[in-house]
Image (cartoon, rainbow, N blue to C red):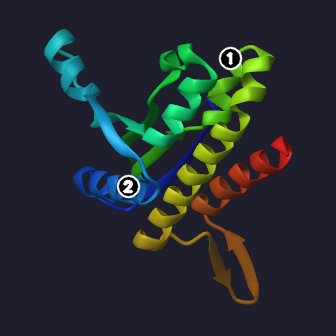
Amino acid sequence: MTGMRKTLKATLSEARAQVEAALKEEGFGILTEINMAATLKARLGLERPPYLILGACNPSLAAKALEAEPEIGLLLPCNVVLREAEEGVEVLIQDPKEMFRVLPEATQRALAPVAEEARTRLSRALARLEKEVGTPLLRRSGRVLRMTHAGAAFKRHVDSLVNDL
């Protein structure tokens, strides 16, 4: 799956508050919430670790997208997943450019500026999270710098961005 990701050293409720604040700084609000663990427990009796799917929306970007393609609502809002991981809470954000690849080429071209702006804003929100929680990208070992797990994930994301240029 293609998406942007960060792991936060926080509880799920702390991570959710941090994610919402970072998204708000970029003009996104949370429209929906699906608590997958609670839903699976209630409907199927399955025990799962906490797993939230948040539907994030930036109204001005959504308006531009709807203007370019009225059926874009099938792909909205942007999904943000918070799930427990060994290292803390993993935050995954749907990459708008990747999501729009399912559309016809002409529609992709029409929506490219919107997808790029959404991706930029979501990437900045993730960067803000890193700064807030102090997740290092590099670790010094003597005179050598080594990438952390978060640094490797960030590098993959940057490589993806560069490849798309």
Q: Earlier in the sequence, mark 2 or mark 1?
A: 2
Residue 87 seen in this snapshot: no
As helix, strand or loop, the secondary structure at mark 2 comes to helix
Q: Could you say which quadrant of the image residue 54 lies in?
A: top left
Mark 2 and mark 1: Cα distance apart in space: 27 Å
Q: Could you say which quadrant of the image residue 107 lies in?
A: top right
Q: Could you say which quadrant of the image residue 103 lies in?
A: top right
Note whether 102 is above or below 65 in the view shown: above
As helix, strand or loop, the secondary structure at mark 1 comes to helix
Where is mark 1, residue-wise? 102
Q: Residue 95 at x, y = what percent?
A: 60, 37
In the image, 75 versus 110, the foreground residue is 110
Where is mark 2, residue-wise? 24
Q: Are the residues at dot 2 and dot 1 in contact (C-beta closer than 8 Å)?
A: no
Q: Which residue is at a point 79% across and 18% down the rendered structure image?
A: 106
Q: Residue 126 at x, y = what percent?
A: 51, 57
- Number of residues whose C-alpha sits closer than 10 Å to that of mark 2, classed few (under 14), some (14–19) or many (20 or more): some
Note whether 68 is above or below 18 in the view shown: above
Q: Which residue is at a point 64% across and 73% down the rendered structure image?
A: 138
Which callout, 2 or 1, points to the residue nearer the camera? 2
Q: Residue 14 at x, y = what percent?
A: 26, 58
